[in-house]
Every structure is written in C-alpha cells, then in structure tokens.
Image: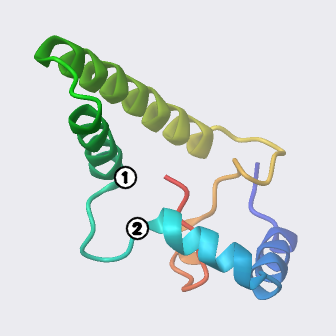
Amino acid sequence: MPWRPAYASEIRQISDTRTAEQIAIAAYWALSVGTPTTAGFWLQVATDGISQHTLSEREATHLYALLSATMFDAQIGCWDAKETPSENPTTRHIPPATAASPHRVRTC
C-alpha cells in the first residue's frame, strides 16, 4: 500500500486534538528516558509480584518463562503488523521521511 498524504493529515489531526488524559496515558506507557525497556518494565512488575506473593524458585522461573515468551510473541506481532501492507491505518507502513517527524508515535 503506497503512502498517501491523507494519512499524514489524519495522524496530524489526531495528534493535534489529543486530550490531557490521552497525553497522560501515552506518557505513562511510553516509559520516559532513562527507564527500562518495555520488556524490562514488565520483568520488574513480575519480580515485584514474585516477591509480594513469595513464589518458589520453580514458580518464579515458570512466570519469567511465560512472560518472556509472551513478550517475544508480542514483538513478532508488532513487527509483522508494521511490515504487512494493509488498509488498517494502525498497520500501514510509514516511510522513513515521515517517520522522523517529532509527532511520530512509537507503538512497539
């Protein structure tokens, strides 16, 4: 699917009309500079839960394995969606020239 200028105007319109709540939600999930990666964030959440619920070493290992496999599958799904042409605006490939925009939203 070729890039169309209408997509850029749609993205700009959404970006320009975000509510304070939408910005706060995005900032929370974006993880600010100096924080762990998304995977690191969820591994920390798991570690906290393991400590809180005093899981055994075997239970903790099982949790880490399931969490890591799930994150790996999610990453594959993100990249597959980004690289698969589609009419869905959330999965269209944005060419590099446009992707460098300061208003670009990082999804994965």
Mark 2 crowd level (few <14, some 14–19, many ≥20, 10 Å Cα): few
- The image quadrant that residue 21 belongs to is bottom right
Secondary structure under badge 2?
A: loop
Give coordinates of residue 24: x percent, y percent.
Answer: 61, 77
Residue 19, above or below 54: below
Q: Nearer the viewer, residue 60 or 94?
A: 60
* Residue drawn at the location 81% of the way across and 76% of the way down: 14
Q: Which residue is mark 2?
A: 31
56 to 44, vertically: above or below: above
Q: Which residue carries the number 1 mark?
A: 38
Residue 68 placement, left or right of 14: left
Instruction: Specify the color scheme.
Output: rainbow
Q: Is residue 80 left or right of residue 63?
A: right
Q: Is residue 65 left or right of residue 101?
A: left
Identity of the residue drawn at 48% across and 33% down: 74
The residue closer to the viewer here, 92 or 16, is 16
Task: Name the amino acid type tagged 2.
Answer: Leu
Q: Decide which of 108, 36 is in the foreground and name it.
A: 36
Identify the secondary structure beneath mark 1.
helix
Q: Amino acid at mark 1?
A: Thr
Position in image of residue 82 (x %, y %): 58, 46
